[in-house]
Image: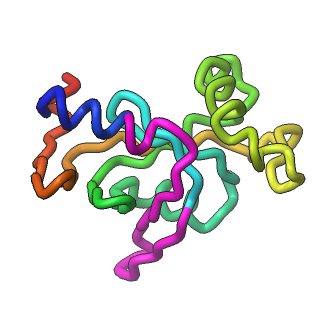
Amino acid sequence: MSGKALSLMTERFGHDTLLSLATLDGNHPSVRIVNSYYENGAFYTVTYALSNKMEQIHKNPQVAVCGEWFTAHGIGENLGYVRDEKNREMMSKLRAVFAEWYDNGHTDENDPNTCLLRVKLTTGVLYHDGKKYMIDFSKALG
């Protein structure tokens, strides 16, 4: 990935971003819009472990995302309870990034099923100012 593409990814998605997230339920695709935050080749979302999307990711972690002239494939991973010590640093960032809506009653951090979803990107296509960037995240980020 060029330095320009990496810079564009951070600029475009390194804040509260609405992102379409597609999963598979058997052979049937399902898509929904989630609030997400991009950092170092991955999108992060706070969600619910017992939701359809998380059940589908558990069965098949292959996902696709789309938003703001960007499409990509990735691997979805439940990083566990949002208050788990291993999630402290990322959750601190997400609480700040999602501050406008995070405490509106939709998210219950006291519920151990409130979890952190990471979508580790594998390949993607980003468009900016008439230029197409083909991104292989595994090569670009090691």
Q: Residue at x 19, y 22 (%)?
A: 142
Is 134 magenta? The answer is no
37 vs 15, nearest the viewer? 15
Q: Which residues are magenta?
A: 11-33
135 vs 51, nearest the viewer? 135
User: Could one spot residue 11 in this view of the protein?
Assistant: yes
Instruction: State the image coordinates of residue 37 (x, y, percent, origin top left).
Output: 51, 41
> Is residue 6 found left or right of 51 in the rendered image?
left
Q: Residue at x 50, y 64 (%)?
A: 56
Instruction: State the image coordinates of residue 119 (x, y, percent, origin top left).
Output: 42, 45
Q: Residue at x 39, y 53 (%)?
A: 61
Instruction: State the image coordinates of residue 132 (x, y, percent, origin top left).
Output: 11, 53
> Is residue 135 found left or right of 103 in the rendered image?
left
> Is residue 91 found left or right of 118 in the rendered image?
right
33 vs 3, nearest the viewer? 3
Q: Residue at x 62, y 26 (%)?
A: 93
> Looking at the image, is 130 positioned above or below residue 74?
below
109 vs 81, nearest the viewer? 109
Which image quarter is the N terminus in?
top left
User: Could one spot residue 65 in this view of the protein?
Assistant: no
